[in-house]
Amino acid sequence: MALVTSKELMEAAAKEPVYAVGAFNAVNLETAQAIFTAAEEARSPLIIQFTQTSLGYTEVEGWVSVTEELIGSILSLARRASVPVAVHLDHGRSEEVAARFMDLGFSSVMIDGSLDEKGKAPRSAEENLAVTKAVVEKAHAKGISVEGEIGLLGQVGEEIPITPELEEKLSDPTKTAKLLDETAGPGYPGWPAGLTRPDEAAQFVEQTGLDLLAVGIGTKHGVYKGKPFIAHGLLQLLREALPVPLVMHGGTGVPDKDVTQGVQEGIRKINIDTQMRIAFYSAINRVMGEMNALHNLADITGETRKYDIRKVLAPAREAVKEQVINRMKVFGCAGRAF
Ligand code: 13P
């Protein structure tokens, strides 16, 4: 199966019975292998993504850069895969970075114009519009799909503060519509920051021509401190207002029932990163504990063969694969390779 665009995957996922395609972040060869193996075993379409911040890992100052080599391996595996695969840039923050990954052969890019190039300060709505439009123009000329983002989705460590009263309103489309009316006007006073407004998003999609939109519906990147709240009422209004597939960021920790409901409400792509990181760490922690108990690793005068990095990395890779398969089953994309 050839490398495909995420738009092609989204079109297939929108056919009944609908599903969402899992988008999994690879940071090195082991995680990439785990993700591809999971897709093959689960017979699932796949979005494998590389996030801009990982450049800080593949391009260590004063050391050799391995970005092109890692990307080359991921693209080669995608072309060899027997399931359809889109290779996607996650949270690209500038035209230059998006262009670099398009030139490397990615079939899909995200331009996250909500934050500045360093990912620190928010961009204005006008700046987001300008950078997203520029990337869409360049990408579409090359047949590449574009995901955009409007407003600030939940950042690591930040939960959207939702009161029980707001929770009730945002769970019901009629009550959400009333709240949208009440909070219309400059700066949207009283509208919870981090949640996407359908009116604003529809204009953004029309003006940019993007293919997929990441929406703020209560999810956030990283581990949730409390119980995650998904604004299903709002999600239903977003689906009605928007002609493009919707993306859920911060998929780790979202309860399965909210995922299933979200898919019925129009979510077609779900991003997962932290869940794989936790699996990788936990496996290493477990194996290191077992090895230490067996060998006393602090005693470096002992048996040399006990220090075998492969014995640590292989179970970590396997653990990531298991988590990816687990998510593919919940997202409904397992068994849907075409
Ligand atoms: P998690 O790390 O919460 O799974 O989110 C991943 C993500 O949204 C990447 O863009």
Image (tube, helix red, strand yellow):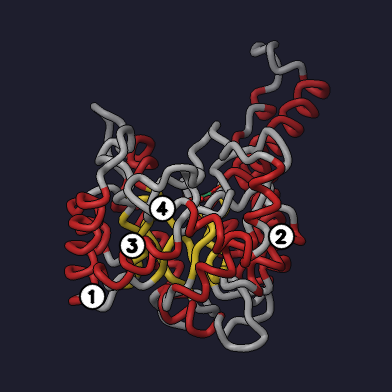
The image position of residue 31, as x and y in percent, is 54, 50
Numbered disc total: 4
Residue 310 is at least partly visible in this image: no
C-alpha gap between disc 2 and disc 3 = 26 Å
Which of pointers 4 and 2 lies earlier in the amino acid sequence? 4
* SS type, badge 2: helix
Q: Helix, strand or loop at disc 4?
A: strand
- The residue sitting at 39% across, 42% down in the picture is 54
Closer to the chain start, of discs 2 and 3, is: 3
Q: Nearer the viewer, mark 1 or mark 4?
A: 1
Q: State the residue at coordinates (39%, 59%).
A: 73
Gap in angstroms between the C-alphas marked 1 and 2: 33 Å
* Residue 295 seen by the camera: yes
Indicate left or right for 199 with 264 as reference.
left
Label 4 vs label 2, nearer the camera: 2
Q: Position of residue 282 (x, y in %)?
A: 71, 36
Label 3 crowd (10 A; few <14 / some 14-19 / many >=20)? many
Indicate which disc, 1 or 4, sits on the residue closer to the N terminus: 4
Mark number displayed over residue 140: 1
Residue receiving disc 2: 258
Which residue is depicted at the point 28% across and 67% down?
Answer: 105
Q: Amino acid at mark 1?
A: His
Residue 67: image location, x then y, percent = 31, 48
- In the displayed structure, would residue 54 be above or below residue 333? above
Residue 50: numbered disc: 4
Query: Judging from the image, what secondary structure is the residue with disc 3 in?
Result: strand
Neighbour tally class for label 2: few under 14, some 14-19, many 20 plus, Cα within 10 Å: some
Residue type at mark 2: give it.
Answer: Asp
Front label number (2 vs 3):
2
The span from disc 1 to disc 4 (Cα, nearest Å) is: 20 Å
* Sequence-wise first label, 1 or 3: 3
